[in-house]
């Protein structure tokens, strides 16, 4: 029969082992609150509880004591109120909120459990790192000192088999308030073989999320920079900001990388960069800086920035950073509400392409967009009023190639739809746009152009649904549209709409140019059909077929846009998703010769242990898009989980038109409960006047926590 008793210890079990999280979050707790917690009664549960004639409280048999978030279990507990001595006979287990656990064979503590001696003590942090010692001494409720220590996060076998790694030390002191571990006379051993010796070593305990110290180092080998070592050092600057410095040293480069992060009450900022001196460009200062962040302002406004700059065109590729061919920097202010949208931004582009001249691309861009939605009861439907401004400048002042343009657009549109008893849906839209342009440094066009573009369209849809006996549902929706626009003046350069795409998103648009500098003119018609099928077994299939007809051809559409001539190419698009992990999506423009001007296909197969994704892109030559040769590329990525410890990844990108590879890569990861090893190798085959083909090899070893989980799988080493 279990006996439950309430008792009050003068030292308070609940405060004997304060949690590390509480120590960090509330380093200066209210003393009155501490006293209140100390006065909380403890709950004692045991098979037998009695008081001896000497007034000693004794609890025997499966003893459990609870107070606050502290739980103590032991075979026997005796408490002498006269001298405040608390004796625990083991095995003993003291848990504090699941974060820290102390195990011991026996213990002699004072009534506050702030001071005392534990024999055969072990401390386990958050079910990860454990510290085993011959004995431990606890002082002032803050420090626990262990002697003759072995610390590891690996599974320790009872048969004496050594863990993969451990730190042997003469003495270890745990500061519970600062959540730090101080080692004296420490040896790092791998399979019980000494590897490093540290006279003094300080490490954060695993319950501390952020602490100043070294992070996992890595070895990086490239054909251009040789073999080098990256050793990140994390600096905690406060509860809400930190700095990481990463020296990268090889025989051919001396680089210092940095990352600064700070969290505010209403926003975040992050800066990443590096400063380099290397043999690739001797005597030159090289580097890069990426900065991004956002802030929520008053009245729903949001400020955003994303800044990217680099010292030269090849730096990002040389140092394995994001392989960008243009750097886009933006500063923006926006506010999005249910019936209003506002956004203004300044954008700067820096080209890294050999084929582009920085002075001749629109590098400085200003945009402002405002839209208001109204719902008039007299007309019904919805009215949208928009005001848009855009300006872009080139740094060159030469005629034509240095052209600068500023544009302002006012747009008003009314939309309404009706659903008839037969199921037919009708959608009407009527609107007009007024554009005014200011054109500089181009003698082929006037300095000022103002034009109006009225438009109207009627769209009919007739969705039909069929319920199959299997439970699947099919929906077939024929679509037809008649549209009309009239552009009063088209003597405007095509600077913003140089790349056009014809897809499901703009099939029913009255202008399929991406920007208002170009607009479609004349009478148009669209026919198409949407089809979808959904089954109870998580099968899903979607398809769209559409084509555009116009009274007059528009010469401003590119060759591969699929929109040249009076009849567009046939738009074919679809996707399939199956319950066994397969997915397929594709889009293509089929011309009158039954060949594709553009096509793309994406496929994937995802399972818990294996995954493959691939894509294929095809495009015919198009000088307007700076594509002189056909594009035919395939990109494959894959992963395979060999077992609970081994995982492999691979990638390949291949140019089918040139019959040559673009990039290959292979990665292997080994992980168990206490160590993670990553190895990867990649080869980039592309080259230019500033970038050479290169091979890169990476290697990292991380000492991880005990019982690390990944994807629901728990890593634990067998002791057999």
Image (cartoon, rainbow, N blue to C red):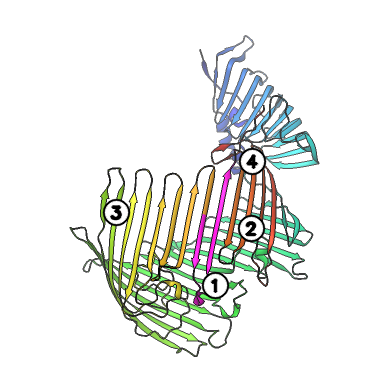
Under tag 1, what secondary structure?
Answer: loop
**Start-end of magenta stretch:** 614-643
For the C terminus, which image quadrant?
A: top right
Q: Left of 660 or right of it: where is 444?
A: left
Mark 4 / mark 2, whichever is N-terminal? 2
Residue at the extreme top: 53
Tell me if label 2 and label 3 are in contact, CB under 8 Å. Answer: no
Q: Secondary structure at mark 4?
A: strand
Q: Earlier in the sequence, mark 4 or mark 1?
A: 1
Instruction: Work out how far the residue at label 4 is from the one at label 2, CA to CA, in angstroms.
Output: 29 Å
- Horizontal and vertical percent position of residue 673: 64, 37
In the displayed structure, would residue 174 be above or below residue 104?
A: below
Label 3, secondary structure: give it.
strand
Q: CA distance from mark 2 to mark 3?
A: 52 Å
How far apart are the alpha carbons under marks 1 and 2?
43 Å
Residue 277 percent across, percent down from the top left: 75, 65
Looking at the rendered image, the disc whose residue lies closer to the viewer, 4 or 1, is 1
């Amino acid at each position: 029969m279990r006996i439950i008793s309430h008792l009050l210890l003068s030292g308070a079990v609940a405060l004997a082992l304060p949690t590390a999280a509480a120590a960090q979050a509330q380093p200066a707790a209210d003393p009155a609150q501490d006293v209140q917690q100390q006065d909380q009664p403890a709950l004692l549960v045991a098979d037998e509880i009695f008081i001896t004639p000497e007034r000693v409280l004794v609890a025997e048999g499966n003893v459990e004591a609870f107070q606050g978030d502290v739980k103590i279990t032991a075979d026997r507990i005796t408490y002498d109120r006269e001298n405040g001595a608390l004796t625990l006979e083991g095995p003993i287990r003291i848990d504090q909120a699941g974060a820290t656990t102390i195990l011991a064979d026996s213990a002699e503590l004072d009534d506050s459990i702030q001071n005392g001696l534990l024999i055969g003590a072990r401390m386990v942090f958050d079910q990860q790192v454990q510290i085993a010692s011959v004995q431990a001494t606890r002082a002032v409720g803050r420090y626990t000192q262990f002697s003759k220590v072995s610390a590891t996060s690996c599974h320790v076998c009872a048969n004496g088999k050594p863990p993969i790694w451990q730190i042997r030390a003469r003495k270890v002191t745990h500061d519970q308030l600062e959540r730090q571990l101080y080692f004296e006379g420490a040896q790092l051993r791998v399979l019980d073989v000494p590897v490093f010796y540290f006279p003094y070593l300080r490490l954060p305990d695993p319950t501390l999320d952020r602490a100043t110290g070294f992070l996992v180092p890595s070895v990086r080998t490239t054909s251009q920079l040789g073999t080098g070592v990256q050793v990140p050092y994390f600096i905690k600057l406060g509860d809400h900001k930190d700095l990481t410095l990463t020296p990268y040293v090889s025989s051919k480069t001396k680089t210092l990388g940095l990352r600064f992060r700070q969290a505010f009450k209403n926003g975040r900022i992050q800066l990443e960069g590096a400063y380099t001196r290397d043999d690739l460009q001797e005597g030159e200062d090289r580097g890069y800086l990426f900065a991004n962040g956002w802030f929520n302002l008053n009245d729903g406004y949001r400020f955003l920035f994303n800044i990217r700059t680099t010292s030269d065109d090849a730096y990002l590729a040389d140092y394995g950073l994001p392989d960008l061919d243009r750097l886009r920097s933006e500063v923006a202010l926006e506010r999005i509400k249910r019936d209003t949208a506002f956004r203004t931004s300044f954008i700067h582009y820096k080209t890294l392409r050999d084929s582009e001249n920085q002075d001749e691309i629109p590098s400085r861009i200003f945009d402002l967009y405002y839209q208001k939605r109204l719902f008039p009861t007299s007309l019904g439907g919805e009215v949208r009023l928009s005001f848009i401004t855009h300006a872009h400048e080139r740094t060159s002042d030469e005629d034509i190639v240095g052209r600068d343009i500023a544009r302002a657009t006012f747009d008003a549109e009314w939309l309404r739809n009706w659903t008839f008893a037969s199921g037919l849906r009708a959608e009407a839209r009527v609107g007009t746009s007024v554009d005014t342009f200011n054109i500089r440094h181009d003698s082929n066009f006037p300095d000022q152009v103002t034009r109006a573009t009225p438009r109207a369209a009627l769209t009919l849809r007739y969705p039909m649904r069929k319920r199959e006996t299997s439970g699947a549902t099919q929906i077939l929706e024929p679509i037809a549209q008649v549209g009309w626009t009239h552009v009063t003046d088209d003597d405007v350069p095509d600077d913003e709409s140089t790349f056009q795409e014809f897809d499901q998103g703009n099939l029913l648009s009255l202008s399929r140019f991406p920007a208002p500098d170009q607009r479609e003119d004349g009478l148009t018609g669209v026919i198409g059909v949407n089809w979808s099928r959904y089954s109870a077994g998580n099968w899903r299939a979607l398809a769209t077929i559409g084509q555009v007809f116009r009274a007059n051809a528009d010469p401003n559409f590119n060759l591969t846009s699929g929109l040249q001539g009076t009849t567009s190419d046939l738009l074919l698009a679809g996707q399939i998703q199956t319950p066994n992990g397969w997915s397929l999506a594709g889009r293509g423009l089929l011309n009158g010769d039954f060949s594709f001007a553009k096509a793309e296909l994406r496929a994937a197969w995802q399972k818990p242990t294996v995954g493959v994704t691939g894509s294929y892109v095809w495009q015919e030559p198009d000088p307007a898009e700076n594509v002189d040769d056909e594009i035919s590329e395939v990109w494959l990525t894959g992963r395979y989980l060999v077992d609970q410890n081994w995982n492999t990844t691979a990638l390949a990108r291949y140019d089918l038109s040139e019959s040559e590879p673009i990039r290959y890569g292979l990665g292997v990861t080994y992980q168990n409960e206490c160590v993670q090893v990553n190895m990867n190798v990649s080869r980039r085959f592309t080259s230019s006047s500033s970038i050479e083909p290169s091979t890169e090899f990476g290697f990292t070893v991380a000492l991880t926590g005990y019982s690390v989980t990944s994807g629901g799988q728990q890593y634990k080493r067998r002791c057999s």
